[in-house]
């Protein structure tokens, strides 16, 4: 009898612990959802014209993990002007996440590289988005660089602005290497300073200097590294649901919110060091050319760029 009573008390105690854990997990999940919805509503209030919402168009995307077991996310920044339905990709990046290795990498693809676009012949790669959306861009990258992409995310630049202002009320500390003013909304002065969302957008979009798009790609990678460094750490994890909510109305993606949250949580929970970055084309892997109907292009040594790219992915 004593044994039976002890076993019953132990069973009741175990059941109580399980119930407490369930309540805690439920409360945590409820709070995370509340924060997420708060972020979404905050951004929706800033969107005046629903027709400009990047989430409206539905795209097909036949993606999968790559041959190395990594999840690759195609990141596209559209340069669509008001009223335009189709546009070239202003920014082309691939975020590489390998859960088994715990690695995070980033590849920038310069928009003027001259490659074969399936079904259309050779053109600048950024025109693939205009001709066939993210799926044609996926096929173009697969054909030329032999890498599969599982997800895509088309980012409206105002989403970048809102994310920066929410995550960094005091701004992102970054070194502006020169005066920047041509063809950007907010001019920048040189020096180490804290930039708000609109200023950061100017920093990552400026390209009207002697090195043009090469400098812009370098600044984009510099900005993402600074943002991840200054946002990193375990203390960031509770903020993630709201941050994801803030940017959601500005993103068109085939990723579930849960997948985004999982990858982001894994990213900030680890001591990962610097994000490894890569650029296509590589140094000495291209030549400048002029093509009738295309203008100035970057004519690749495709085999060399592909081989070096895969070396980067497997390091």
Image (cartoon, rainbow, N blue to C red):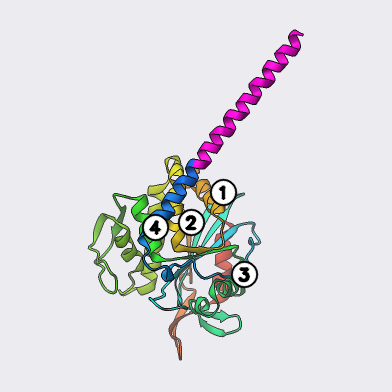
**Badge 1: how crowded within 10 Å, few (<14), some, or many (20+)?**
few
Q: Quadrant of the N terminus?
A: top right
CA gap, disc 1 to disc 3? 22 Å
Q: In the depicted view, which residue is nearer to us: 262 or 291?
A: 262
* Residue 280 drawn at (x, y percent): 49, 70
Q: Main secondary structure of the magenta part?
A: helix
Q: Residues within 10 Å of mark 4 (few under 14, many from 20)?
A: many
Residue carrying label 1 = 102
> In the rendered structure, which disc, 1 or 4, sits on the residue that comes first in sequence?
4
Q: Residue at x 41, y 73 (%)?
A: 79
Task: Indicate which disc residue 110 carries.
Answer: none
User: Marks 3/2: CA distance?
Assistant: 20 Å
Q: Which residue is mark 3?
A: 146
Q: Disc 1 vs disc 2: which is toward the camera?
A: 1
Disc 4 target residue: 43
Give the structural element (helix, strand or loop) at label 1.
loop
User: Is disc 1 in contact with disc 2, using a CB cutoff of under 8 Å?
Assistant: no
- The residue singled out by tag 2 in the image is 276
Foreground mark, 1 or 4? 4
Q: Earlier in the sequence, mark 1 or mark 2?
A: 1
Q: Which residues are magenta?
A: 1-30
The answer to the question of whether label 4 and label 2 lie on touching residues, with beta carbons closer than 8 A, is: no
Residue extending farthest right = 1
């Amino acid at each position: 009898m004593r044994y039976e009573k002890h076993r019953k008390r132990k069973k009741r105690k175990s059941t109580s612990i399980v119930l407490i854990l369930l309540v805690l997990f439920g409360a945590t999940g409820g709070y995370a959802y509340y924060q997420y919805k708060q972020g979404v509503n905050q951004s929706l209030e800033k969107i005046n014209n629903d027709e400009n919402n990047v989430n409206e168009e539905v795209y097909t995307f036949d993606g999968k993990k790559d041959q190395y077991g990594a999840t690759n996310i195609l990141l596209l920044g559209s340069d669509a002007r008001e009223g335009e339905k189709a546009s070239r990709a202003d920014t082309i990046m691939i975020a590489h996440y390998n859960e088994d290795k715990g690695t995070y990498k980033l590849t920038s693809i310069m928009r003027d590289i001259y490659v074969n676009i399936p079904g259309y012949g050779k053109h600048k790669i950024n025109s693939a988005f205009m001709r066939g959306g993210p799926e044609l861009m996926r096929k173009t990258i697969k054909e030329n660089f032999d890498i599969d992409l599982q997800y895509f995310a088309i980012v409206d630049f105002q989403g970048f602005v809102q994310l920066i202002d929410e995550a960094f009320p005091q701004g992102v500390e970054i070194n502006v290497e020169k005066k920047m003013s041509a063809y950007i909304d907010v001019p920048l002065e040189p020096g180490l300073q804290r930039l708000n969302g609109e200023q950061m957008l100017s920093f990552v979009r400026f390209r009207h200097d002697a090195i043009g798009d090469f400098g812009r790609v370098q600044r984009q990678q510099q900005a993402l590294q600074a943002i991840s460094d200054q946002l990193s750490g375990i203390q960031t994890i509770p903020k993630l649901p709201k941050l994801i909510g803030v940017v959601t109305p500005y993103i068109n993606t085939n990723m579930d919110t849960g997948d985004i949250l999982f990858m982001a949580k894994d990213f900030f929970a680890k001591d990962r060091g610097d994000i490894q970055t890569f650029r296509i084309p590589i140094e000495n892997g291209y030549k400048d050319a002029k093509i009738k109907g295309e203008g100035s292009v970057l004519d690749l040594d495709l085999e060399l760029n592909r081989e070096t790219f895969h070396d980067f992915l497997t390091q």
